[in-house]
Amino acid sequence: MLEKTTKINMLYDFYHELLTNKQKEYMELYYREDYSLGEISNLRDVSRQAVYDNIKRTEQLLHSYEEKLHLYEKFMKRNQLLTTLQQLIINGSDTTEIVKVMDKLQKID
């Protein structure tokens, strides 16, 4: 569950500007403020089911944006390569290996 929450939060960070204000509000209350569906429904005077449906549709939308734009995937690849690069430098690795990793970083588009 924590892994899913972390990924949704990351997707939200990348794509929140593409969401409606209502979608943003529900996602922030649910994922960032840790409100329950019932608390959000009481706060906004809508049914719990309406909140659930909105959040699920928004999650699907975020995944859809990621399938098309790959911002999260590229971010994760960059982080992995930067960690690798840091380790190569700390370990005093051969310049050739460092250059290979740097080339991979530059090719992430």
Image (spheres, helix red, strand yellow):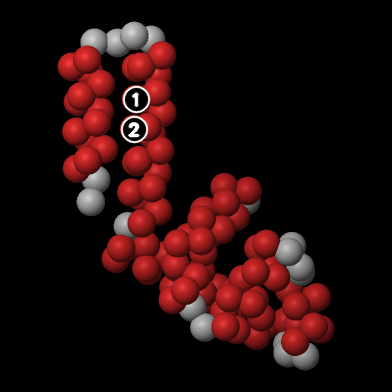
User: Looking at the image, is 108 positioned above or below residue 58?
Assistant: above
Instruction: Say which element carries label 1.
Output: helix
Residue 38 lies left or right of residue 80; in this view the side is: right
Can the viewer see residue 89? yes
Can the viewer see residue 52? no
From the viewer's side, name the closer residue of 50 and 26. 26
User: Looking at the image, is 107 positioned above or below residue 96?
Assistant: below
- Residue at horizontal 36%, vertical 25%? 84
Q: Residues within 10 Å of mark 2 (few under 14, many from 20)?
A: some
Q: Residues within 10 Å of mark 1 (few under 14, many from 20)?
A: many
Q: Which residue is mark 1?
A: 85
- Residue at horizontal 30%, vertical 63%? 69
Please say if the residues under marks 2 and 1 sit with CB atoms less than 8 Å apart.
yes
From the viewer's side, name the closer residue of 19 and 95. 95
- Residue at horizontal 70%, vertical 70%? 29
Q: Position of residue 38 (x, y in %)?
A: 79, 76
- Residue at horizontal 37%, vertical 62%? 66
Q: Position of residue 3 (x, y in %)?
A: 57, 47
Among the 4 quarters of the image, the one containing residue 77: top left
Indicate which disc residue 35 carries.
none
Instruction: Say which element carries label 2.
Output: helix
Q: Position of residue 64 (x, y in %)?
A: 37, 69
User: Looking at the image, is 10 positioned above or below residue 56?
Assistant: above
Return the residue found at the far bottom: 45
Q: Which residue is mark 2?
A: 81
Q: Position of residue 50 (x, y in %)?
A: 65, 85
User: Looking at the image, is 82 positioned above or below residue 41?
Assistant: above
Amino acid residing under circle 2: Leu
